[in-house]
Amino acid sequence: MSFHKEFEKFHDIIRIDKDKKTSLLSNKSALREKIKKHFKEKERSEPKFYIQGSMDKNVSTGINPINGDYDIDDGVYLQGITTNDITPETAHKWVLDAVDGHTNSKEDKPKCVRVNCWDAKDLATARIDTWPADA
């Protein structure tokens, strides 16, 4: 068997299939909408978002993790605010407050807010790490 055929078999095993990727990105989008809604309710500028790493649509190098724990890193870029206006701790708290109630599992990490998400079909479980950054 050729190396290329062996590689294709290996790739089929490790790659994230279309349904799982769709579920993961749907969870990310729902969390973004919750954050935007919270900021609007608090009369703050709508943040921008930038997905980092392997789940970026332009990179798309995500693989199936051995433990089944997908990790999505999503930057929350606060608009019209700098570290001269608020402290990083305040920005962190704003994001923590914004994701409250999205799922029954969130973690306040030192450098990010982690929201644990599941989909209805149990296709994918993801940790979505959000962190505030001034733009």
Image (tube, helix red, strand yellow):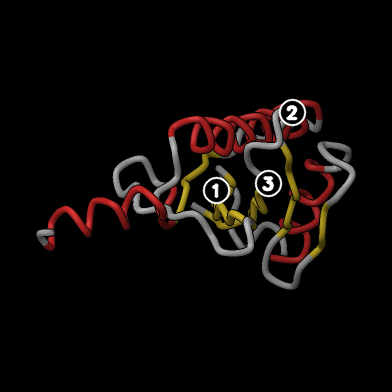
Three-letter amino acid code at the position of disc 3: Thr
Residue at image x 13%, y 59%? 1
Mark 3 and mark 1: Cα distance apart in space: 25 Å
Name the one closer to the observer, 120 or 129: 120
In terms of secondary structure, where does tag 1 sit?
strand
Secondary-structure class at tag 2: loop
The type of residue carrying mark 2 is Ala
Residue under label 2, please give it: 120
Residue that label 1 marks: 77
Q: Position of residue 36 (x, y in %)?
A: 67, 31
For this view, does 16 lie left or right of residue 84?
A: left
Which is nearer the N-term, disc 2 or disc 3? 2
Mark nearer the N terminus (3 vs 1)? 1
The residue type indicated by label 1 comes to Tyr
Judge by depth and name the residue closer to the eye, 6 or 113: 6
Q: Residues within 10 Å of mark 2 (few under 14, many from 20)?
A: few
Residue 81, percent from left and from top: 60, 50
Q: Give the residue at mark 3.
A: 125
- Residue 113 on image: x %, y %: 73, 57
Tell me the number on the disc at residue 48: none
